[in-house]
Amino acid sequence: MIAVLVVGGALIASLAIIRSSASTSGPASEWKGTAITPDRPRPDFVLTDLEGKPYDFRARTAGTLTLLFFGYTNCPDICPIQMATLTGALRTDPGLPATVVFVTTDPVRDTPDRLRTWLQGFDHPVTALTGTPEQLVAAQEAAGLQPAIAGPPRPDGSYDVGHAAQVLAVTPDDRIHVVYPFGVRREDWLDDLHRMLEVPEWQARSGS
Amino acid sequence: MTWWCSATGQPWSWSPIAYPGIWLAMGVLVAIYVRSWRRLAAAGALDPADGKRRWAFGFGVGALWLATDWPIGTLGSGYLASVHMVQFQMYTLLAAPLLLLGMPPAMFGRLLAALRIDGLAHRLARPVVAGVTFNLLLLFTHSPFVVDRARTNQVGSFVLDVLWLVAGMILWLPVLGPRNGFRHPSPAVQCLYLFLAMGVVPMIPGAILTFSELPLYSVYELAPRVGSIDVTADQQVAGLIMKVGNLPFLWTAIAAIFFTWARRDREAAVTGTVPVTH
């Protein structure tokens, strides 16, 4: 009987440890991303969507919680993981009113068909944008990011593209308060996105 | 130098990776076994029936190597939770019992004496102690806190691998411990022990992995993807393997214990002796 109680108690305690240690939550006041001071305005750029139509980012996403990421589909690590964690979190909570916008930094290889196929793998609606190299540099600069640079080609013609790894969270007040470097987990996304929608100063202003 | 499998964050590739530390560990294990075998043979301490134990040891080392080295070790330590769970089953349900079976009683006794853990091993060989210890080690070494910290460096990853092998040996000690030194429970208790320790308790963490909406381990969640395998699906498969992957091993072991028991009873009935079950 004592052995059973000891086993039961130890198992319950261990399971409690497993569950609690799965959470990486820190103090309630801290964001899982990096808060930026001063905050930045919603980027103003016009690119092309997968239908070949102009997409005015600032106008089309105004007043919404928007998650903006610059990357490329041949990226071997950062881009697929960032997109998978972000869209995975949003799939878990379909009611979360957040728009994901993916802008390619490799317009030569990331054709509309290639972008469409790649994004289908994430099983969540994502707005994909492309443009001329000049337009894409301008868009990254408008977002406050260092423009991406293509690396030297390998013998087989493939190449990597060095680009900013963070996702920019544009809140409904049309400001960027927090950016998310690589390494943010799904549960962190869910925590932060819910909290962003609860900060009164970060909500859409009437008439804006 | 990369001497042991750990999570590196590098994109997965099917190009083999050399882990000299793993080869060295396997070489040391075999060298110690061969040296010990020769010494015991020279001293006349081996039973003629011990000869076939070398096969069990060989297969045990083979299973251990397969589970530790590329590709299973690499995938399990830094890419896929499901492959890790296969690796864990190979450690605890294949390599550990085969290594135990592969050691002649005299060799096992000398090993425990050399490590000064003779008393500890005898205490661990009691079913309740062994079952609790195995399952606590299972839970501890699968907690996200431990996995996410240990798997990202080679020393931590090595320690986890050793702990899983030790946990497997503890699990099998009440059933496969040498008959000359360890008191074995009756066959019925052995079957019940294996069913509870190996079959029932691991279903709980297995269910947590299977039904968790979010990935539990950051080391697998933030790892470069292997093909198009989704993190959540990978974790669900890992949970299923933890829950039911052990069943073929469990029922094979229970069947073996049962048929050995029946055979001994039949032989005892024929010769008119009392069957020896301890």
Image (tube, coloured by chain):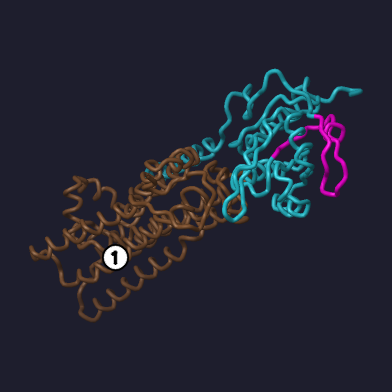
Chain A's colour is: cyan
In the rendered image, the residue lying farthest to the left is B43
Helix, strand, or loop for circle 1?
helix
A126 left or right of A181 in image: right
Q: Quick check: is A69 in the magenta stretch?
A: yes
Residue B132 visible in the current orientation: no
Q: Nearer the viewer, residue A139 or B139?
A: A139
From what the image shows, is residue A41 above or below residue A181? above
Residue at 28 percent of width and 60 percent of height: B100
Which residues are drawn in magenta?
A44-70
Residue at 49 percent of width and 53 percent of height: B75
- Residue A112 image position (x, y, % from top left): 78, 51
> Subunit of mark 1?
B
Q: Nearer the viewer, residue B192 or A176?
A: A176
Q: Nearer the viewer, residue A23 or B158?
A: B158
- Residue B9 image position (x, y, % from top left): 52, 44
- Residue A24 image position (x, y, % from top left): 56, 33
A11 left or right of A150 in image: left
Residue at 16 percent of width and 59 percent of height: B35
Residue A105 visible in the current orientation: yes
From what the image shows, is residue A170 above or below residue B140? above
- Quadrant where the C terminus of chain A sits is top right
Q: Quick check: is B200 in the magenta stretch?
A: no
Answer with the quarter of the image where residue B269 lies: bottom left
Which residue position is annotated with label 1? B58
Chain B's colour is: brown
Q: Nearer the viewer, residue A168 or B155?
A: A168
Residue at 85 percent of width and 39 percent of height: A55
